[in-house]
Image (cartoon, grey):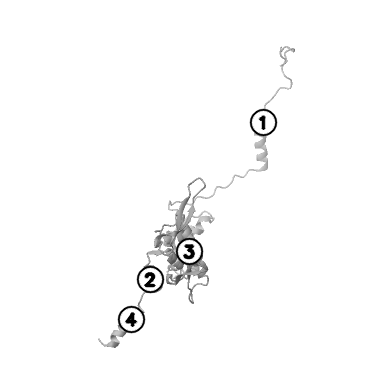
Amino acid sequence: MSKDDVFGSFADEFMNALSDADLYKLMDVISVEDAAALIAGVSPNSVYHDYYAGEGYIAIRTNQGDPYNAQEVFSISLKTLGHAIKSGKLNAHIVITPNVESLTQDCLNKDWIAISDIDTAKTTIDRDDLREWLSDRGVFPHLLFPNGKKDDYMNQKHPNYSAKLALCVRAWEEAQTANLNGKRVKGFIEDWMKDNAKAFGVTNTGDKFFKDLAAIPNWDVTGGRAKAKPTPLKVSKSADKNLATEIQKKLTVNLPNELPKTDIDPDIPF
C-alpha cells in the first residue's frame, strides 16, 4: 500500500470520527457540572474553575454558535441541580467538600445536621435519572434529548415525523370533546380525518384507508348503534298549571270551619 493510500485511509477514518453529540451519548454517568453544561447547550469541556476577589467560582467558555444565554442557563442549572440533589429529588452519587460546612434541618422540630457542600465536579448523576428529572419538569435540552421532547411527534419539521401518527393523535384529542351528533366515535374520527388529513401531510384519501386508520384512535369498540341524546319532555303551560293544581289539592288538609266543643275545665291553664 502506498503512502497516499495510507494517508487517504487515515483521512477517511478522521472524517468518520464521532461527533460531539455522539460523544455526549457515551456519557452514561456525568458530573453535576457536565450536566449543567449540557443543559445550557455547550460542551462539558467548556467548564472551568477560577477565583475572583478570593472567592472561587465555576463558569463556562462560550464559542460562536453556542446559545446566547448559555452562561446564565449554566449558572442557574448548576444551582438548581445542587438543590435537587440535596433535597433528595434527584438521585446522585454525592461527593462532599469537607472544609466548608453548614447546618441544615427540615423543620424546627428536628435536630440540626452539619453538612458540607457537594463537590459539583466529582458528584455524579446517572444520565437516565437526569433525563427523567428534566422530563418531569417539561425541560428537554437538545444535547440530552437529541430526538426532541416527548410530544415532538406533532412537529412536522422533526426528522422522524410520522404523518399518520400525528393525524391519529389529533383525531383522538378532537373526539374527546366533540359533539358526535348521534355518530359512533369511529365514524366521527373517520370523517374528521378525511377533512383534516392534508394539513398533517397525509395524502392517501381512499375510504378504506381512513376506515382502517380510524380504528387505531377509536376507543369505543362495543359496537352497535350510537345512543341518541334523550329529548327533554315538553309540557304545555296549561298542562303544567293543571298538574300543579292537582298536586296542591292532594297536599291540602280540609279543616272544619269551627273547632269542636270540649268539656275542658276553663280553670286549667292549658
Nearest-to-viewer mark from 1 and 4: 4
Which numbered circle lies on residue 249?
1
Q: Earlier in the sequence, mark 1 or mark 3?
A: 3
Q: CA distance from mark 2 to mark 4?
A: 19 Å
Q: Earlier in the sequence, mark 1 or mark 4?
A: 4
Q: Which residue is mark 3?
A: 78
Tag 1 near tag 4, CB within 8 Å: no
Q: Is residue 23 above or below residue 253?
A: below
Q: Relative to the observer, which residue lies in front, 158 or 130?
A: 130
Q: Quadrant of residue 242?
A: top right
Amino acid type at circle 2 is Leu
Q: Secondary structure at mark 3?
A: helix
The amino acid beneath tag 1 is Lys
User: Disc 1 and disc 3: Cα gap in Å?
Assistant: 80 Å
Which residue in the structure is indicated by mark 2?
23
Check if mark 4's residue and mark 3's residue have beta carbons within 8 Å. no
Question: What residue is pinned by disc 4?
Answer: 12
